[in-house]
Amino acid sequence: MLGVCYYPEHWPESWWRDDARRMKDLGLTYVRIGEFAWSRFEPDPGRHDFDWFDRALDVLGGAGLKVVACTPTATPPKWLVDKYPDILPVDPHTGTVRGFGSRRHYDFSSETYLRESNRITLALAERYGKHDAVAGWQTDNEISCHKTTLSISESAKLAFRRWCKDRYGDIATLNEAWGNIFWSMEYRSFDEIDCPFLAVTETSPAHRMAFFRFSSDQVARFHQAQVDILRAHSPGRFITHNFIPMNETGVDNYKLAESLDFASYDNYPLGRTDLWMADRPASDFQRYMRTGHPDFGTFFFDQTRSLAGGKFWIMEQQPGPVNWAGHNPRPEPGMVRLWTLEAFAHGAEVVSYFRWRQAPFAQEQMHAGLLRPDCTEAEAFPQVQQVVRELAALDLAPAPVAKARVAIIADQEAQWLGEIERQGNSYNHTKVTLAWYMAARALGLDVDFIPPHGDPSGYDLILAPGLAMPTAAQVKRLADSGATLVFAPRCGAKKPDVTMPEGLPPGELRQLLPIRVVNVETTRPDCPDTLVWGNKTYESRTWREQLEVGDGAEVLARFDNGDAALVRKDKALYLASIVGEDLLTDLFESLCGERGIATVRVPPDMRLRRRGNIMFAFNYANEAQPAPAPAGAAFVLGGPMVGPRDVSVWKV
């Protein structure tokens, strides 16, 4: 099904009924409203005005649309900030208070704001929790975006001290765990601990890791309070949240999503491609400038699907140029349709476009909608009409997404470690994970994500581009899964408080592999080394480890100086360098062959995804390419040649 984001408070009430009619005529089912409307819900302290929202729900519900109502806590109103200035966060890098004037101006550690957000959530839940038009709820909005997880306010400092006391029990234990004898950093009591920012040079990595964990827990605590209120007062309605990636928020999204019915994701392929490829030459970037990179969207689709029971929505889908990236081109013709079908192929149950009508005012007036500000249809509108027809032909409801045979471990603590202890300016954990994902997708593979604490059973190949601080129990679960396991450098590199494991890295992974990392070097990206595997030479880039290899392990690849680069014992492999997609693709293809997993090297800029008994082929290229379909395949959509920026679907 399809939906749209709508802001009745932005438009004359005389427009609402016609908007609702046009939404229904277009074939939309869901309408998300209310996520930024606190100042209209409560224009003065304690004085609620819900009449306008009542009428909006009546109009939308009367047109046969289902409403996703939102808690408006991403935008506390000015009067609330003036009344309670302690709700404002403090920037960890400058020490300045982040003020009113945009959004997300609140501190997750503020008990005052927790109380106030719960109060407005309760008021909405009590009034609309059983409303016939309300199908479900979205909590807050893109929680922690704009780098708002971390705050070094007085509230955060005091809460962090309490968190540390709860975690470590006594100050001697904390001092020992953090290695505070170094640089005379020992504390006499928890009351001496500050937030690990604004020091002369780098602060303790253990201190920073603790603060990142604490901050993530504060976000989860804040969010869970809203979920609990909605559960109590809105029975039978779903609760979701529109996530952005963990690497951008610094939050453990798995923990945040534990009590949701499903997770949602906000998909902006062009904006993300512009940001991700900002340092790439034009020769690499230009072909994706108006299509988005073929892996950047699905990378997050597959992660989001893993957060809450395997179901997900796209709550915001880019319909045209956006306003927030470094550069904001418009999509090539047909791309909004392609992105929409791609989300459904990866298991989305609903794709909701942002937004219905482009706003002619304020910060997002350059952000396209399905309608222009004058109510005429924008370029995406006929593409949505086409999607409606095609979804009817595809009939995806009886075609669930099956469990993949390949999984990637998504480790937020590996992301934090990469930020805390970079060791090389070129190291980027998310880019490493994306490279492993891209290599798998280049082989036509479907991919699931699992967290370090997740269930690895049922997978044939598990890829660990990051597993920074595995516990013995986690390693045993991986071993017991029977899967072939591939570990990247830095896996097992640390103990939980960012100290080296006894006997050297990879720590607990030595249960599987008799190796020790005896040296680590990082190099500039323009100074690659080489390694040889299978009589073929590949590049070794930016991160390289020297391994001491024990009995029982086989060296599969060696660096140019003869040191071990890829080691295997039984079903476990350890790669001692960051490498290019070519080696990863060759390696994964070989391992899939061992496990009987079918692979196909897809044409450049084409990607495959299976859903139920149908296979999708998405062509991001500017020229037609052959679909890797068997002879005589029955095509449901398109044909054997997939047109430029087009889709073909066949039965399998």
Image: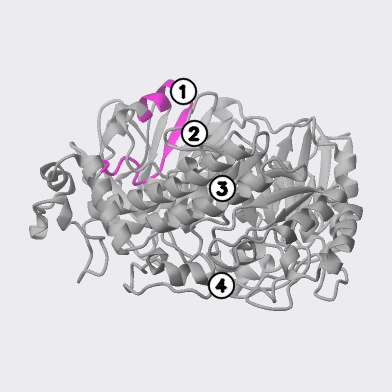
Q: Mark 3 points at which residue?
A: 122
Amino acid type assigned to the residue bearing label 4 in the image: Pro
For image coordinates 48% across by 52% down, the residue present is: 246
Mark 3 near mark 2, Cβ–Cβ under 8 Å?
Answer: no
In-front residue for pair 11/563: 11
Taking the magenta stretch, the answer to whether it contains residue 130 is no
Amino acid type assigned to the residue bearing label 3 in the image: Leu
Mark 1 near mark 2, Cβ–Cβ under 8 Å?
Answer: yes
Label 3 SS: helix
What is the C-alpha distance between the residues marked 2 and 4? 33 Å
Mark 3 near mark 4, Cβ–Cβ under 8 Å?
Answer: no
In-front residue for pair 123/57: 123
Residue 264 shows in the view = no
Judged by depth in the image, the label closer to the viewer, 3 or 2, is: 3
State the quadrant of the C terminus: top right
What is the C-alpha distance between the residues marked 4 and 1? 42 Å
Mark 1, Cα crowd under 10 Å, few <14 / some 14-19 / many 20+, is some
What x and y, as percent, mark residue 644?
Answer: 81, 59
Up-down: is 44 above or below 138? below
Which mark identifies residue 462?
Answer: 2
Judged by depth in the image, the label closer to the viewer, 1 or 3, is: 3
Residue 290 shows in the view = yes
Amino acid type assigned to the residue bearing label 2 in the image: Ile
Mark 3, Cα crowd under 10 Å, few <14 / some 14-19 / many 20+, is many
Q: In this view, does 322 lie to the left or right of 213?
A: right
Q: Earlier in the sequence, mark 1 or mark 3?
A: 3
Range of the magenta residues? Answer: 474-496
Label 2 SS: strand
What is the C-alpha distance between the residues marked 3 and 4? 51 Å
Q: Name the residue under label 4.
A: 281
Amino acid type assigned to the residue bearing label 1 in the image: Ser
Taking the magenta stretch, the answer to whether it contains residue 477 is yes
